[in-house]
């Protein structure tokens, strides 16, 4: 039996309600009503704009959401959650899961960051329309520590989104399956700069907020690869092992605070992960999931939100999540 996690499993994929295309670098979305539902209204919010969107039309069919505030929604009410790598996969699903879990109590604010800003804007509009959560999006490449990560909270976020309560370090990638000594230096650099130094840099930007307030959650998305290295994944496995070491050290360093440090390690999950690994070769990416039933990004998002929505004295410090057919990084049962 699967553990009970927040949210009805009947709510899964967002219903696209708005088609938008803007050139703004950062944008804020909410579901406050406008008189003209087809035209977004731009309000000046120096030095960036807020974009306000109407609620869904009464003629749109939307799935019902419980209006009774659960313990989960009450604990998330009024919190600000920052998610890196939120334009697809686990990051995107985590954004929707937080918004839906908090909806009955309301007041949730989401900060979604990634490189693909246009995609973030559509996700933000869908979340705002469905749940009423306030969503701010910002273009952020975590691999560019000096150029983009340093000072990003003050530079990219409106004042009302800066008091972050939960940081989900989700941005990460893998490149290739080469073995030493044939691993491209460019692949090594991009994996370490994104998966390790980028994650650490974002944490160091947000952690002072937690320490000043005296509470907060750092949730790092790791991998089974960080626990069990495998052939053809030397660099990726090394980066995820580094994330695991950083997470465990950070938890020990912050033991006298009320800051919770959490790691969620997925096994096989079907996302863009393999497509990126094989440089867009869909046939190779599809072969990774042939004959198996992998986890979905929603499965991991549920675990992340569950961990973040426990009462303050409960720390889900370490979680390893497999699909039913998987027993380790390399032991999987495939249907013939």
Image: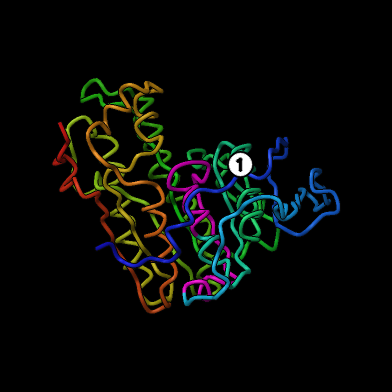
Residue 292 x %, y %: 23, 38
How many neighbours does mark 1 have within 10 angstroms: few (below 14), some (14-19), or many (20 or more)? Answer: many
Q: Residue furthest right?
A: 35
User: What residue range appears in magenta?
Assistant: 72-97
**Which residue lies at the image location 31% right of the left edge and 68% below the top edge?**
252
Residue 132 lies in the magenta-colored region: no
**Which residue lies at the image location 39% right of the left edge and 42% below the top edge?**
195
Q: Quadrant of residue 269?
A: top left
Residue 63 x %, y %: 56, 56
**Which residue lies at the image location 72% right of the left edge and 39% below the top edge?**
24
Residue 94 lies in the magenta-colored region: yes
Residue 301 x %, y %: 41, 55
Q: Tag 1's secondary structure?
A: strand
Residue 185 x %, y %: 34, 25
Position above or below: 32 against 72: above
What residue is disc 1 on? 139
């Amino acid at each position: 039996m699967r553990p009970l996690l927040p949210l009805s499993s009947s709510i899964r994929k967002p219903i696209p309600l708005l088609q938008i295309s803007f050139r703004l670098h950062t944008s804020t979305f909410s579901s406050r009503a406008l008189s003209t539902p087809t035209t977004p209204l731009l309000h000046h919010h120096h030095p960036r704009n807020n974009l306000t969107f109407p609620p869904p039309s009464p003629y749109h069919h939307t799935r019902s959401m419980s209006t009774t505030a659960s313990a989960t929604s009450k604990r998330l009410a009024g919190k600000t959650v920052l998610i890196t790598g939120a334009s697809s996969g686990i990051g995107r699903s985590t954004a929707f899961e937080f918004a839906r879990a908090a909806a009955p109590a309301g007041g949730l604010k989401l900060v979604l960051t990634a490189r693909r800003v246009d995609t973030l804007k559509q996700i933000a509009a869908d979340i705002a329309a469905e749940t009423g959560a306030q969503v701010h999006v910002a273009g952020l490449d975590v691999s560019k520590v000096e150029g983009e990560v340093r000072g990003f909270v003050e530079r990219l976020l409106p004042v009302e989104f800066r008091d972050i309560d939960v940081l989900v370090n989700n941005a990460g990638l893998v490149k290739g399956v080469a073995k030493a000594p044939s691993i491209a230096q460019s692949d090594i650099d991009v994996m370490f700069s994104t998966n390790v130094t980028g994650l650490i840099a974002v944490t160091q930007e947000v952690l002072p907020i937690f320490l000043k307030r005296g509470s907060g959650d750092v949730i790092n998305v790791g991998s089974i690869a960080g626990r069990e290295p495998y052939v053809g994944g030397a660099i990726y496995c090394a980066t995820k092992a580094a994330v695991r070491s950083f997470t465990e050290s950070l938890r020990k360093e912050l033991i006298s605070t009320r800051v919770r440090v959490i790691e969620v390690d997925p096994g096989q999950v079907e996302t863009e992960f393999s497509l990126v690994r094989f440089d867009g070769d869909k046939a190779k990416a599809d072969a990774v999931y042939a004959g198996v039933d992998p986890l979905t990004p929603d499965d991991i998002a549920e675990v992340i939100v569950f961990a973040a929505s426990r009462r303050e004295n409960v720390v889900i410090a370490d979680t390893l999540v497999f699909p039913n057919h998987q027993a380790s990084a390399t032991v999987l049962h495939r249907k013939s």
